[in-house]
Amino acid sequence: MTVQVSRRGLLKGIGVGIAGGTLGALGFGDLQPAAAAAVRPFKLAQMRETRNTCPYCSVSCGVILYSLGDRSKNAKSAVMHVEGDPDHPVNRGTLCPKGSSLLDFIRSETRTKYPMYRAAGASEFKRVSWDFALDRIATLLKEDRDRNFVAKNGDLTVNRWVTTGFLGASATTNETAWVTYKTVRSMGALVFDNQARV
Amino acid sequence: MARFFKRAPSKDGADERASDESPAKPREPEWAADKRDALKPDPDRIGISGAVPFVRLPQPDSLFAERAARFRALAPGHPLAGYLDFLGRIAEAQAAVQALYADGTLPAPEPEGDLAMRAEHGMPALSRALLGDGRPFLACLDALLARLDLTGAPEAARDALGRLSAAPPEDRLDLATQVFEGAFPVERMAECVFVSAALQVLVAGQAARLDAKVLKPVADGVCPACGSAPTASLIVAWTPADKARYLSCSLCGTLWNHVRIRCTACGSGEDVTYYGLDEVSKDVQVEACGTCHSYLKHLHQHRDPALDPVADDVASYGLDLKIAEDGFRKAGLNLLFVS
């Protein structure tokens, strides 16, 4: 009987486990229980590595987020380290001082995690729903556009709206950036960048 | 990429002429120009390059000696101490046999034309054809068996050595061919270890003489030099490839680049998790793929440069036992430790 290694490096064939493989064949079979006993009290620690893009500038360096815990189970996962992605053609594993401090960015207490609203005259921000926030943004955009839209410059049709600006994100895909561009430009907005250049 | 950052030669030739004419300025000595060049910004110095090298060919002169030293360092107090000591002796014998070949007495790898054709058709550079009529291999195996000191090893190991020494040449060559092809006869597992050890010396010597530039990716998890499965995955800390991942070939010891966070067996990057036993070592993990349910040892050589793919794969056997309980299968091969 033969044990065949597949192209994927997996051992095919029955009896490998039963025979104890090389260890048993060479007469070291009695070491196996000791090896098993040595690790029995321990629990496997899980770690995830996730690729992402640094949100700071238009260079868009690749980063790897190292997190503890498993997404699929009830355990709460937490990012514990951020590092440049060595496979990314832009930065080859390097990061600038801003990128290197991304972990503090993630854990920052002042990080905005949901829409916040400070009503006129109020002294504090309050958490609001996305519906509220989007309605409010749309209303203000429309008001400003109605007031300041420039259709003509003399005889020349220009259709421009320069009193409101729009910033897209650096980590969006090409497709998202395209849709953002079409949406914003179709309103006539000229002050537009698909990138938060900090 | 680094080229983009390099400054073009200065275009202000006019200024230079002007200053040449001025009698106040003495002529610069030649070394001054060199010094000025040294002060120019040069991103290459910080080790970034556009692409990491695809392969690092084995260095047999140090490979086996360092492996033997690693086995010796790992053995004391380890649950598998006896086996680590045994493999340490095999690695020492491999290093001794390798020393015989240091003067270049190994037969040459395949002819240039063959290599080009193999690369063109996406085949690994070395094949079992290099065993040829078997003379180089049999000489290598004899030299290894003669240098192997098995005092104190279990009877089964010494018996296997005796059986292999007594076996006819055709039989040994047949075994070597099977090992090269990744087929292990279960009833001769013990003899396969010695045959593999000799084969490793022979094939590493051949791979070391290849031209790294002719090696092209063959397939995921297949060595571009000899077509074998990887033993382990290493995160390295070399200057042009800091923290890149390389797979270590089980047969020839060639290291080849494989993108990180991507399964080496099925190529999926969807559900890759790293497991480890923090109490034992934080530098040895497994990369487990939730798509094909296989795993490969993942060694953080950038944190501990002493880690050896073969030796530490054996030493972290406990991790194999633990991860197997979770239903993962090993997608790597350790010729000295088939389990």
Image: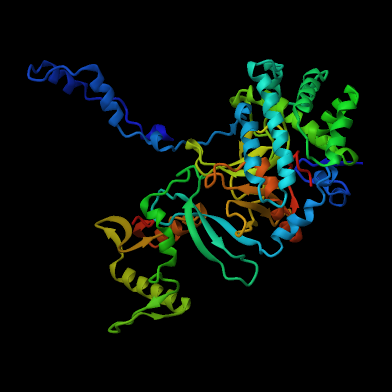
In the displayed image of the protein, which residue is found farthest to the bottom? Answer: A122
In the displayed image of the protein, which residue is found farthest to the front? Answer: B152
Looking at the picture, tell me which residue is in the foreground, B93 or B214. Answer: B93
The percent position of residue B241, horizontal first and vertical second, equals 51, 39
Looking at the picture, tell me which residue is in the foreground, A61 or A152. Answer: A61
Is A162 situated left or right of B53 in this image? Answer: left
The percent position of residue A144, horizontal first and vertical second, equals 31, 71
**Image quadrant where one finds the N terminus of chain B:** top left
* Colour pattern: rainbow
Count all numbered tags in the image, as a single digit.
0
Q: Is residue A145 visible?
A: yes
In the displayed image of the protein, which residue is found farthest to the left? Answer: B24
Is A144 situated left or right of B331 in this image? Answer: left
Which residue appears at 79% of the width and 27% of the height? B145
Looking at the picture, tell me which residue is in the foreground, A117 or A21. Answer: A21
The percent position of residue B282, horizontal first and vertical second, equals 58, 55
Which residue appears at 61% of the width and 34% of the height? B66
Q: Quadrant of residue B96?
A: top right
Which residue appears at 33% of the width and 68% of the height? A145
Looking at the picture, tell me which residue is in the foreground, A128 or B138. Answer: B138
Q: Quadrant of residue B91?
A: top right
Q: Is residue B287 above or below residue B202?
A: below
The percent position of residue B108, horizontal first and vertical second, equals 69, 17
Which residue appears at 65% of the width and 38% of the height? B248
Is A4 situated left or right of B297 in this image? Answer: right
Q: Is residue B124 visible?
A: no
